[in-house]
Image: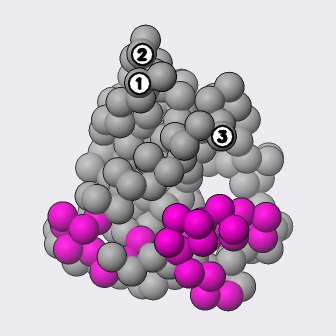
Amino acid sequence: MTIKITNVKPDDLLDIFKIEEAGFVPGQSATKEAIAERIEHITDTFFVARNEDNKVIGFINGPVVNQRYLTDDLVIKTTVNPANVGFQSVLSLAVSAKYQHQGISGQLLKAMEGNALSNKRQAVNLTCLRELIGFYERHGFKNEGMALSKHGGAEWFNMVKVI
């Protein structure tokens, strides 16, 4: 299967929202409005994976931030990325169930990391649930302990990959 990674387009919104809703439990998934705001403001750090039919089958997104760890307010409000400074955050990484376990998440992470490197970001950071720590460690992230986040009532962990 050939996968193409591209920047998001405005008309990808509904496909992304469906994948987001399926990939996260209620209270942890981004709203359609939050995704639309991310598409509008951070197109440069919002990547989608497309199959041979050009259908969106996965995505990764996140703003550039000034702090090493994510804060809950980033999930709600997104602003335009600053140039050549800061940390590249990952707010959402999700792949359609039909396409999981085929390396697509890894390809999306590599796209985000490559963009972060070319824009001189210090690191890529994200928070994840306990059961996903191993996945991110296999992709070079370091677990830096429990996050302050209380998003969706879950226990989150700070993961950082210096690039």
Mark 1 residue crowding within 10 angstroms, few (<14) / some (14–19) / many (20+): few
Helix, strand or loop at label 1? It is loop
Whether tag 1 and tag 2 are in contact, CB under 8 A, the answer is: yes
Quadrant of the rendered image containing residue 118: bottom left
Mark 2 residue crowding within 10 angstroms, few (<14) / some (14–19) / many (20+): few
Q: Is residue 3 visible?
A: yes
**Residue situated in front as seen by the camera: 128 or 150:** 128
Of callouts 1 and 2, the N-terminal one: 1
Residue 17 colored magenta? no
Quadrant of the rendered image containing residue 133: bottom right
Helix, strand or loop at label 2? It is loop
Magenta part of the protein: which range?
116-145
Q: 116 left or right of 16?
A: left
**Residue 65, horizontal then vertical, whole percent:** 37, 74
Q: 33 left or right of 78?
A: right
Measure the alpha-carbon separation of dots 2 and 3.
Answer: 18 Å
**Residue 153, horizontal then vertical, whole percent:** 82, 67
Q: Mark 3 points at which residue?
A: 101
What's the amino acid at mark 1?
Thr
Measure the alpha-carbon separation of dots 1 and 3.
Answer: 15 Å
Q: Mark 2 points at which residue?
A: 52
Q: Name the residue under label 1.
A: 2
- Residue ID at (53%, 36%): 58
**Residue situated in front as seen by the camera: 152 or 98:** 98
Rendered view: 55 above or below 86 = above
**Residue 108, horizontal then vertical, whole percent:** 44, 47
Helix, strand or loop at label 3? It is loop
Of callouts 1 and 3, the N-terminal one: 1
